[in-house]
Structures are given as C-alpha cells and as structure tokens.
Image: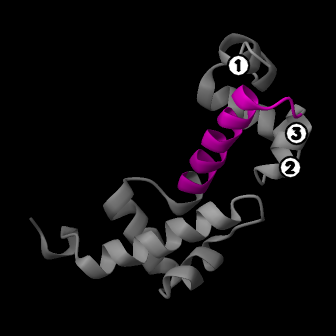
Amino acid sequence: MHKNDERTAADIFCLQQVTEYIQKSFHEKIGVADLAHAGKISKRECYRLFKRLMGISPSLYVTKYRLQRAQVMLRETEKSVTEIAMECGFGSSSYFAKVFRSANGMAPREYRRTVGNKSI
C-alpha cells in the first residue's frame, strides 16, 4: 500500500467531522469550502480525503446523503415533493426530481407510490 493510500486515524477523524457536519447541515447550501472548514483542512485535502476514503467527491457524497434523507421522507411522511426537496437542500423541486430520477430510475412521486409506507 502506498503511503498516501493509508487510512490514518487523523484522516478518519477528519472525515467523521466532515460527515457529522453534513448530517447536521444537509438542508443548507453546502460547498466544499464549508466541508473543509468543518474538517479543519484545505479544500484540496478535502477532495483528496473523500476520494481516498470514500471513493467519491465531497459534492457527490453530499448529494447521495441528501437523496437518502429524501427517500426516507418520501416513504415516511406525507410532505410534498417540493417540501422534501427544500428540506433536503436541493435548490428546486425540478432539480431534485432530475437528480432523484437519475439516481433511482424513477421520479420522487413514483418512488413514493412504489415503496411508500402503505399505512399513511
């Protein structure tokens, strides 16, 4: 294993700080600068850390986290797609629908009908 590929305790701690920030702030606008600040690292190191430990960019990680939260809300609440889009940090419901469809192969409303909580 190359020295730069090693997962150090410091890297893991830093990544934990950043992911905790994402979990608390996913509904807000989040940039790589915000993530780097949360981890007390540079933006460049933030990109490297995510690529090395998670295999994806920080921005993609944020989007995936937001989509996971949206899926839960679609299944477990009666909130509108627009409300869910806004609460999950997507700029608009149309952008949310586009990203959601790309990731899940179906629109948010279709997802809700297909896998939603039948007891609601």
**Circle 3 residues within 10 Å: few <14, some 14–19, many ≥20:** some
Q: Is residue 114 left or right of residue 41?
A: right
- Return the disc, 1 or 3, that comes first in the chain's sequence: 3
| Secondary structure found at label 3 | helix
Q: Please determine whether, in this image, residue 115 is positioned above or below residue 51.
A: above
Which residue bears the numbered disc 2?
86
Which residue bears the numbered disc 1?
117
- The stretch of residues the image draws in magenta is 61-79
- Of 96 and 84, the residue lying toward us: 84
- Within the image, what quadrant is residue 30 found in? bottom right
- Give the amino acid at mark 3: Ser
| Secondary structure found at label 1 | loop
Whole-number angstrom distance, CA of label 1 to CA of label 3: 21 Å
- Within the image, what quadrant is residue 62 found in? bottom right
Task: State the residue lying farthest toward the left.
Answer: 1
Callout 3 touching callout 2 (CB < 8 Å): yes
Which residue bears the numbered disc 3?
93
Tell us which disc is closer to us: 1 or 3: 1
Tell us which disc is closer to us: 1 or 2: 1
